[in-house]
Image: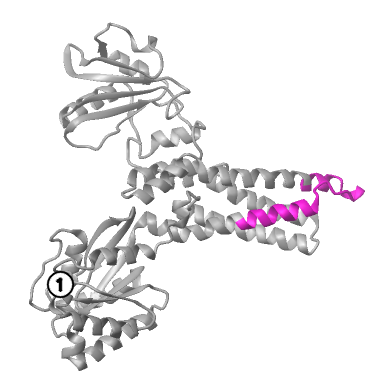
C-alpha cells in the first residue's frame, strides 16, 4: 500500500498568520526542497545531518519567494519513517501557495487527508490505535480529552491489548499444536493456566468496555439541557455559566424559540449547555416548534436542569403543582438521567423564604435540588460542581486506560463475546479444534484495534477524518 510519491501539504491552519509550515514526505522530499532552496551557509540539504534546521531562501528560478527555515528529518527517524522536510515560511496565504505550487510543479503531489499519519502507520512508526489518537489529540478541546489522547498516542491502550493478544496467541499456538498430535491424545496447553488467562482477559476487556461510557462523553462533551417554563431565567443561566451574553434575555415570555448551544470546560471536562424554548401551551406555530425541539433535546441530553422561579411556591399554588407534575414527568420518562431541579431568582427572597424553599425541595426525591440566582450568579459555581460530580473522573485521575473510540469499543465487544465462548468451551470440555476457532476470532478482533488485521477500506475510513497535512 505504500507508494513512492513525494507528498506535500500545509501542516498549519490555512489563512494568514505569523508563520506557516509546509511539510514534504517521500523518497524525493530532500531532493525537491534542495532544488528550490538556497542556504545562507551555501551547504546542500542532502549533505546535512538529520534533525537539523537551516536558514535560507526559497527561490523559483531567479525569483526569491521567501526567507525560510528548513528542517530535515531523514528516514527512518522521522514522523512518517520516510525522508521529511518541513519548511517554515512567513504566514502570508500568497507565500504559502507560491511554495506549494512550486513544489507541485517540481514533482510532488498534494497529500490526501491523514496521509502523513497513514504512512507513519504503514511504515511501522505507530500502530493503528496510536494513529487514531493523533486525530483525537488535534481535536481535543479540554484537559480530559487531551489527557486521554496523549495516553493512547503513547501506546497505553495498545500495550494492554498487545500484551493480552500475545499471551492468548501463545496458548493458541499450543492448542493448534495439539491438533497436529490428535491421535496421540496429548495436551500441550495447561488448561488450568489457560482458564486463569481467560479470566484475566475477561476482567481487562470488561474494564475497557465499561470505560467507554466515560470516555465517550469526555470526548464528545456532556450535553446538558436547561428546561422550564418561559421567562424563568434559562437564557440568563446559560449566559452566567458561559460568562458572556450568548442568549437574548427579555422579560417577554417565549423569547427563546429555538435551542441555543455552547460549550464550556468545567474541571477539565467539556459540558455542552442547551438553552431550550420555554415549555407552555401556545398557539404560536414557531414557538410550538421550539417547544417540540425542547423535548427532543431532553432525549439527547446526559443531564437535565429544570428551572423555575423561586417565589412561585409561595405565590402561586396552582403553578407550583404544575411544576411538580412536570418534574415528575421528566423523572418518570428518563429515570436514568441526572435531574437537577433549580429554584432561580432567589435574590428576590428573604432568608426565611429561602429556608422554607430549601425544606420543600429537599422532600423531592430522585433529583438534586439547588437554590440559585442566575442574575447575581449566586450558586452558579455550586451548580458547576454538581454537574462535575456526575462524571466518573476516578479513572482519569488514576491515569487508567479509557476507551473513547467507537471502533475500538465495537472490536472489544466482539472480542469479549469470543472470549466468553472460549471460557464456556473450557468449562464444558470442548475439543481443541472448536476452541481454536473461537480463539482465532478473538485474536482477529484484538488485531483490528492495533492494525495487525486491517484492509484498505478500513484505513480509508479512518484517515479520511484527519486534516490534510497530518
Q: Nearer the viewer, residue 317 or 77?
A: 317
Residue 349 picture quarter: bottom left
Is 93 placed above or below 341 here?
above
Report x, y in % for residue 186.
88, 48
Q: Residue at x 58, y 56 (%)?
A: 205
Residue 207 picture quarter: bottom right
Instruction: Specify whether 169 is left or right of 460.
Output: right
Q: Nearer the viewer, residue 222 or 293?
A: 222
Q: Residue at x 27, y 7 (%)?
A: 41
- The number of numbered badges drawn on the structure is 1
Instruction: Specify whether 15 is left or right of 366.
Output: left
Badge 1, how many Cα within 10 Å: few under 14, some, many 20+? many
Query: What secondary structure predominates along the stretch shown in magenta?
Result: helix
Q: Is residue 188 in the magenta section?
A: yes
For label 1, the residue is 256
What secondary structure is marked by label 1?
Answer: loop
Report x, y in % for residue 311.
17, 83
**Residue at far front of view:** 352
* Residue 171 appears in the rendering: yes
Q: Is residue 456 in the magenta section?
A: no
Q: Residue at x 15, y 58 (%)?
A: 244
Report x, y in % for residue 153.
45, 41
Is 427 placed above or below 123 here?
below
Q: Residue at x 33, y 9 (%)?
A: 44
**Residue at far bottom of view:** 318
Report x, y in % for residue 191.
79, 53
* Residue 405 appears in the rendering: no
Q: Which residues are magenta?
A: 175-203
**Residue at far right of view:** 184
**Residue at far left of view:** 251
Quadrant the C terminus occupies: top left
Is 235 placed above or below 408 here?
below
Amino acid at each position: 500500500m505504500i507508494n513512492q510519491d513525494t507528498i506535500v501539504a500545509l501542516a498549519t491552519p490555512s489563512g494568514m498568520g505569523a508563520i506557516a509550515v509546509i511539510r514534504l514526505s517521500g523518497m524525493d522530499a530532500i531532493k525537491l526542497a534542495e532544488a528550490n532552496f538556497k542556504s545562507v551557509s551555501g551547504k546542500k540539504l542532502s549533505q546535512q545531518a538529520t534533525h537539523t534546521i537551516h536558514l535560507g531562501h526559497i527561490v523559483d528560478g531567479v525569483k526569491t519567494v521567501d526567507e525560510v527555515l528548513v528542517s530535515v528529518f531523514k528516514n527512518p527517524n522521522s514522523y512518517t519513517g520516510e525522508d521529511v522536510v518541513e519548511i517554515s515560511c512567513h504566514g502570508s496565504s500568497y507565500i504559502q501557495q507560491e511554495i506549494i505550487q512550486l513544489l507541485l510543479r517540481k514533482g510532488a503531489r498534494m497529500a490526501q487527508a491523514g496521509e502523513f499519519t497513514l504512512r507513519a502507520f504503514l511504515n511501522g512508526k505507530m500502530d493503528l490505535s496510536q494513529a487514531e489518537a493523533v486525530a483525537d489529540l488535534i481535536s481535543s478541546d479540554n484537559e480530559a480529552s487531551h489527557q486521554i489522547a496523549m495516553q493512547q498516542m503513547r501506546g497505553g491502550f495498545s500495550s494492554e491489548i498487545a500484551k493480552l493478544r500475545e499471551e492468548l496467541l501463545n496458548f493458541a499456538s499450543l492448542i493448534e499444536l495439539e491438533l497436529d498430535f490428535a491421535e496421540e491424545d496429548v495436551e500441550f496447553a495447561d488448561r488450568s493456566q489457560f482458564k486463569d488467562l481467560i479470566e484475566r482477559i475477561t476482567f481487562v476487556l470488561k474494564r475497557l468496555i465499561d470505560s467507554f461510557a466515560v470516555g465517550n462523553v469526555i470526548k464528545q462533551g456532556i450535553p446538558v439541557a436547561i428546561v422550564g417554563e418561559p421567562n424563568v431565567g434559562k437564557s440568563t443561566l446559560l449566559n452566567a455559566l458561559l460568562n458572556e451574553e450568548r442568549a437574548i434575555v427579555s422579560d417577554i415570555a417565549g423569547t427563546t424559540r429555538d435551542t441555543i448551544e455552547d460549550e464550556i470546560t468545567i474541571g477539565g471536562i467539556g459540558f455542552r449547555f442547551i438553552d431550550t424554548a420555554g415549555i407552555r401551551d401556545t398557539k404560536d406555530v414557531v414557538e410550538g416548534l421550539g417547544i417540540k425541539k425542547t423535548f427532543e433535546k431532553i432525549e439527547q441530553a446526559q443531564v437535565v436542569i429544570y428551572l423555575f422561579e423561586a417565589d412561585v411556591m409561595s405565590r402561586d399554588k396552582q403553578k407550583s403543582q404544575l411544576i411538580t407534575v412536570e418534574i415528575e414527568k421528566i423523572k418518570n420518562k428518563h429515570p436514568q438521567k441526572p435531574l437537577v431541579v433549580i429554584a432561580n431568582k432567589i435574590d428576590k427572597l428573604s432568608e426565611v423564604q429561602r429556608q422554607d424553599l430549601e425544606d420543600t425541595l429537599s422532600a423531592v426525591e430522585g433529583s438534586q435540588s439547588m437554590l440559585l440566582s442566575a442574575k447575581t450568579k449566586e450558586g452558579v459555581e455550586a451548580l458547576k460542581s454538581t454537574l462535575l460530580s456526575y462524571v466518573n473522573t476516578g479513572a482519569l485521575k488514576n491515569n487508567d486506560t479509557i476507551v473513547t473510540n467507537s471502533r475500538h469499543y465495537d472490536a472489544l465487544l466482539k472480542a469479549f463475546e469470543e472470549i466468553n465462548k472460549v471460557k464456556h468451551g473450557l468449562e464444558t470440555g470442548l475439543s481443541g479444534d472448536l476452541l481454536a476457532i473461537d480463539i482465532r476470532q478473538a485474536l482477529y478482533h484484538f488485531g483490528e484495534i492495533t492494525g495487525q488485521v486491517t484492509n484498505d477500506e478500513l484505513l480509508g475510513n479512518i484517515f479520511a477524518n484527519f486534516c490534510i497535512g497530518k
